[in-house]
């Protein structure tokens, strides 16, 4: 596992961490044993940074992480994001036109169909043996400005797949250029003026 400094805190955090939103009930019922197995597997793989918040499943992820800490860990860094409770209907697919957020389903202003076209283009350049999620995480880790990529996961297999992204070789210059071209073609026309 690659470790990076978290901002100016001096903490060394795992390059790929775990977002614990999926441990709560927002994304459907999640068995506590499976959630604990996922958290344990993350620790075994070198993860030391977990994104939790009291809004994630009404604090379930924080309670399970505290339980894990007591059971198997001596030192862990837990980041708790302050924030407002997100609308629980977002995961039920009703936000396509922006009913819950001001930018629609993607939260960024890219319309759904265009987003799917961009994903199809990205699939063509995803290196063999890498999932799209791993490709995306590896791309994020290419930025020196990123302390830690924090994907969610509620099963040990998801955590393993995500953490493995840090073990892949850096993406080629050609792949990075192609990602930039896809951004320029599909994404930039819809959102870049907002920045």
Image: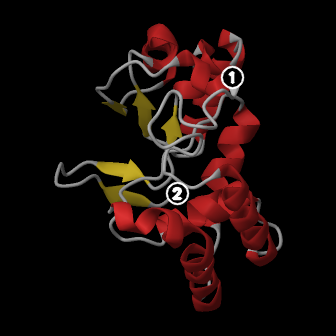
Is any atom of residue 69 visible in this view?
A: yes
The circle on residue 104 is none
Mark 1 sits on what residue? 92
Quarter of the rendering containing residue 183: bottom right
Outermost residue toward the bottom in this view: 174
- Give the left or right position of residue 62, taking residue 4 as reference: right
10 Å neighbourhood of mark 1: few (<14), some, or many (≥20)?
Answer: few
Q: Is residue 184 above or below residue 55?
A: below
Residue 24: give x, y in percent of width and height: 57, 16
30 or 34: nearer the viewer = 30
88 or 79: nearer the viewer = 88
Quarter of the rendering containing residue 45: top right
Residue 146: give x, y in percent of width and height: 37, 61
Mark 2 sits on what residue? 1
- Give the left or right position of residue 47, taking residue 75 as reference: right
Is any atom of residue 170 visible in this view?
A: no
Q: CA distance from mark 2 to mark 1?
A: 35 Å
Quarter of the rendering containing residue 81: top left
Who's the residue at 82% across and 67% down the image?
A: 129
10 Å neighbourhood of mark 2: few (<14), some, or many (≥20)?
Answer: some
Who's the residue at 37% across and 67% down the image?
A: 193
Tag in front: 2 or 1: 1
Residue 137: give x, y in percent of width and height: 58, 59
Residue 123: give x, y in percent of width and height: 78, 68
Who's the residue at 66% across and 26% down the image?
A: 94
Dot 1: element:
helix
- Give the left or right position of residue 130, taking residue 38 as reference: right
The answer to the question of whether label 2 and label 1 lie on touching residues, with beta carbons closer than 8 A, is no
Who's the residue at 38% across and 27% down the image?
A: 74
């Amino acid at each position: 596992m690659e470790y990076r400094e978290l901002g100016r805190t001096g903490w060394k955090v795992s390059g790929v961490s775990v977002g614990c939103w999926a441990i709560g009930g927002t994304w459907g019922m999640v068995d506590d044993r499976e959630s604990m197995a996922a958290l344990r597997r993350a620790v075994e793989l070198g993860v030391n940074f977990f994104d939790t918040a009291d809004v994630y499943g009404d604090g379930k992820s924080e309670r399970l992480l505290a339980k894990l800490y007591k059971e198997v860990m001596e030192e862990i860094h837990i980041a708790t994001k302050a924030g407002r409770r997100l609308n629980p209907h977002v995961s039920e697919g009703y936000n396509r036109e922006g009913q819950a957020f001001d930018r629609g389903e993607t939260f960024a202003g890219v319309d759904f169909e265009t987003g799917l076209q961009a994903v199809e283009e990205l699939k063509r350049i995803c290196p063999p043996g890498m999932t799209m999620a791993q490709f995306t995480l590896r791309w994020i880790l290419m930025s020196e400005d990123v302390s830690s990529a924090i994907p969610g996961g509620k099963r040990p297999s998801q955590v393993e797949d995500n953490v493995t992204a840090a073990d892949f070789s850096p993406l080629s210059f050609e792949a990075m250029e192609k990602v930039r071209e896809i951004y320029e073609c599909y994404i930039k026309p819809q959102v870049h003026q907002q920045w």
